[in-house]
Image (cartoon, helix red, strand yellow):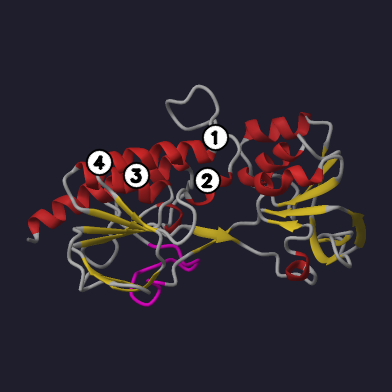
Amino acid sequence: MNKEFDIAIIGAGPGGVSAAIYASRGGLKTVVFEKGLIGGQIVLTADVENYPGFEENMSGFDVMDKMRKQADKFGTIFKAEEVKEIEPEKKIVKTANETYEVKAIIMATGANPRKLNVVGEAKLTGRGVSYCATCDGALYRGKTVAIVGGGDSAVEEALFLTKFAEKVYIIHRRDELRAVKIIQERAFANEKIEVIWDSVIEEIEGEQFVENVKLKNVKTNAISDLKLDGIFVYVGINPNNALIKDFIEMDEAGFVITNAEMLTNIAGVFAVGDLVQKVLRQVVTAAADGAIAAFVAEKWIEENK
């Protein structure tokens, strides 16, 4: 049983790394477990323009690289290991290689893109179906693509795709977008973007790559064809809650319920970032969550020696 750390942070997105900075700086021996890329989903974002203090746009990768280096400076230990199990009451974290006993746990496992679950989606994922415009947009230079969704992420990524694609459709099931007004205005002013209202994708067609989608108008039930080279899906996210779903309180969608101190229903177990029930999922809110959780965890550890 490894007992060298005071606090374990599971996940290294903005919330997890922010928590690591505050915890390490506060004198706690801190370990962060991350099975994938340090930075989470934000590293896939080409331009971060609304993070306070950065007048010039920075890539998500650069933002997280700076945060990681800051955490390193204060002594955070990052381990590229997948956490297989946790025992929240005992504060035990198990990976494939070792078992750790800590004094507090911060869950920062984030969320993953939601799928359309239509015919052809799984078959053509990676061959025209994508969930990351920043990752794959450059592959569609001069081609015709569609974004599915109507929120901030969907419309922002549609604008990003106009750097490469000849034509970008936004397919939205409602008759108005949910994105903030300034982003909508940019999209409506862009001559490459066309919105297809009141419509959903019924089927994605193509032999080796995406060629066509069947669209259904939700008001008339009319079916139509739309020739496409690529589809980018932005219809929401699913929380990565598998490690804690059996004992942490969550809402109906599976997002963790915390109090204002980011504490879950189990003492000494905190949750931050996209995993948490909240109204805004941004780098700045995740970072704030992490700072609060680490600050409160430090006090909780001191009080429960």
- Which of the two residues, 249 or 286, is positioned nearer the viewer here? 286
Amino acid type, callout 2? Ile
For residue 18, which numbered disc appears in the image?
Answer: 3
Q: For mark 1, what is the residue? A: 48
Q: In this figure, which residue is indicated by the disc labeled 4?
A: 74
x and y percentages locating residue 266 in the rendered image: 25, 68
Q: Nearer the viewer, mark 1 or mark 4?
A: 4
Name the residue beneath numbered marker 2.
Answer: 42
Tag count: 4
Task: Tell me whether circle 2 and circle 1 mark residues in contact (CB < 8 Å).
Answer: yes
Q: Quadrant of the N terminus?
A: bottom left
Q: Residue furthest front?
A: 97
SS at mark 1?
A: loop
The answer to the question of whether label 3 and label 2 lie on touching residues, with beta carbons closer than 8 A, is: no
Reading the chain from its start, which is encountered first: label 3 or label 1?
3
Question: Looking at the image, is mark 2 or mark 4 earlier in the sequence?
Answer: 2
Q: What's the distance in space between the residues labelled 3 and 1, CA to CA?
A: 17 Å
Circles 4 and 3, Cβ within 8 Å, touching? The answer is no
Q: Which residues are magenta?
A: 243-256
Give the label, 2 or 4, closer to the camera. 4
User: Is 79 positioned to the left or the right of 211 in the image?
Assistant: left
- Could you tell which of marks 3 and 2 lies nearer the N-terminus? 3
Mark 4–mark 3 distance (CA, rounded to whole Å): 12 Å
